[in-house]
Amino acid sequence: MSSPRTVTLLGSTGSIGTQAIDVVTAHPDRFVVEAISAGGSDVGLLAEQAEALAVRTVAVADPARADDLRAALATRLGSRADDVEVLAGPQAATEVAGRGADVVLNGITGSVGLRPTLAALEAGSTLALANKESLVVGGPLVKALAAPDQIVPVDSEHSAIAQALRGGAHSPARSEVRRLILTASGGPFRGRTRDEIKAVTAEQALAHPTWAMGPVVTVNSASLMNKGLELIEAHLLFDVPTDDITVVVHPQSVVHSMVEFCDGSTIAQASPPDMRLPIALGLSWPDRLDVVSPPCDWSQATTWTFEPLDDATFPAVGLARAAAAASGTHPAVYNAANEQGVAAFLSGRVGFCDIVDTVERVLGEHEGVAPAEVTLETVEAVEAWARGRADELLARS
Ligand SMILES: NC(=O)C1=CN([C@@H]2O[C@H](COP(=O)(O)OP(=O)(O)OC[C@H]3O[C@@H](n4cnc5c(N)ncnc54)[C@H](OP(=O)(O)O)[C@@H]3O)[C@@H](O)[C@H]2O)C=CC1
Ligand SMILES: CC(=O)[C@@H](O)[C@H](O)COP(=O)(O)O
Ligand SMILES: [Mn+2]
């Protein structure tokens, strides 16, 4: 048995973060968590995690929550709280990510995860990546920095593809891959027309049919923006042209994605919808851990169905294809305008269709920067422009 891997958990209080803690605490011989980080909305939970995992460092993005975090640590740990380092501020997650660990799991929501992603890669850590937004918005930067196999996907579809790709050759020298098939649940509004989804509520959009996740990714699943982000994510992770990536709707979310090879064979990865499996693989890759989530139950009659995506009601995937083809910064605009739209929708300021309509309009106004010319400053400037422009359009919706 090799020595335990050191782990840094970014976004430890969220859906991915708490499930990652389930995985590491079930395998104490395999992992030692050294640092955790979150935004600061629940410092009580952060302190509880710090105690349970005996971490050395806790980072919180909101500096106004630092004193409350220290107080919560003192309540739990007494004088031992002095041994726990507290980092606070918008760069705190980047700082802990940059200190290096065997594995940094990025479970932050949104493109605010970009700097931590880059810092983890620069430090030479394996990056277990749930934060798809950082790859999408910083594609050329992340690709330039990442060594082969340094990024291990945690997103369920991309974990499935990474597993299936082990079934055939796929390298710059020789590839037997014909196409990737990305599955989508279709979300809570599958089967409806555009007119039928215009007036849906946040509560309805947050009722995902198969997965329990954080609010942003859940709304993105309902609009199919999540699948658009995942299409770009797959293109960047696996070096497959977007034209060779097909999205298919699979409402049961048991087949997490597939790879079709040149001989006509398709390899699918199947398991009941439970993120602990791809999280565990992300932390232990390429090893598998003993059962972390229940497998399929073959004693029960089961039906898996597949259907084409309705691009008329859900144009988000088509917009992602166009964004990926347009320039090195259109994907950042796609994501930033969406983040603004989701926030406006969840706070009741705009309707559901305004999210993707706004993404389309802001994309249409962006001139774009060639991938080779993209810098971190370019990405951040483009994002700031896209957020501002999206906010203007959303305010008029
Ligand atoms: N949940 C899932 O099943 C899946 C999620 N993903 C992806 O994983 C990522 C996380 O999703 P999910 O766990 O659902 O989201 P959640 O909203 O549940 O959790 C987000 C976490 O990020 C923290 N956070 C927010 N801002 C910062 C910051 N600036 N610095 C450090 N931490 C921060 C939050 O802390 P706080 O609450 O204090 O702000 C929280 O701990 C997303 O990119 C999502 O698309 C992918 C596949 C499946
Ligand atoms: C669990 C996971 O990976 C999510 O990103 C999931 O894909 C959401 O489901 P749909 O976007 O397919 O509805
Ligand atoms: Mn996914």
Image (tube, rainbow, N blue to C red):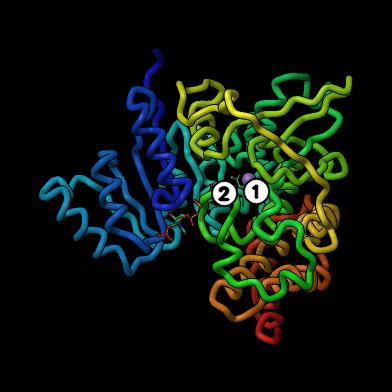
**Does residue 370 appear in the picture of this structure?**
no
Between 326 and 294, the residue placed more toward the observer is: 294
Question: x, y (%) of residue 314?
Answer: 78, 61
Between 327 and 269, the residue placed more toward the observer is: 269
Please state the quadrant of the image where ligand 3 appears: top right
Say what amino acid the circle numbered 1 marks: Leu
Q: Secondary structure at mark 1?
A: helix
Say what amino acid the circle numbered 2 marks: Asn
Between 16 and 75, the residue placed more toward the observer is: 16
Which residue corresponds to mark 2? 131
Residue located at (34% from left, 22% from top): 29
Q: Name the residue at the front extreme.
A: 301
Which residue corresponds to mark 1? 135
Give the quarter of the figure containing the C terminus: bottom right
Give the quarter of the figure containing the N terminus: top left
Residue located at (30% from left, 54% from top): 45
| Position of residue 109 in the picture relative to residue 234 (left or right) | left
Label 1 to label 2: alpha-carbon separation: 8 Å
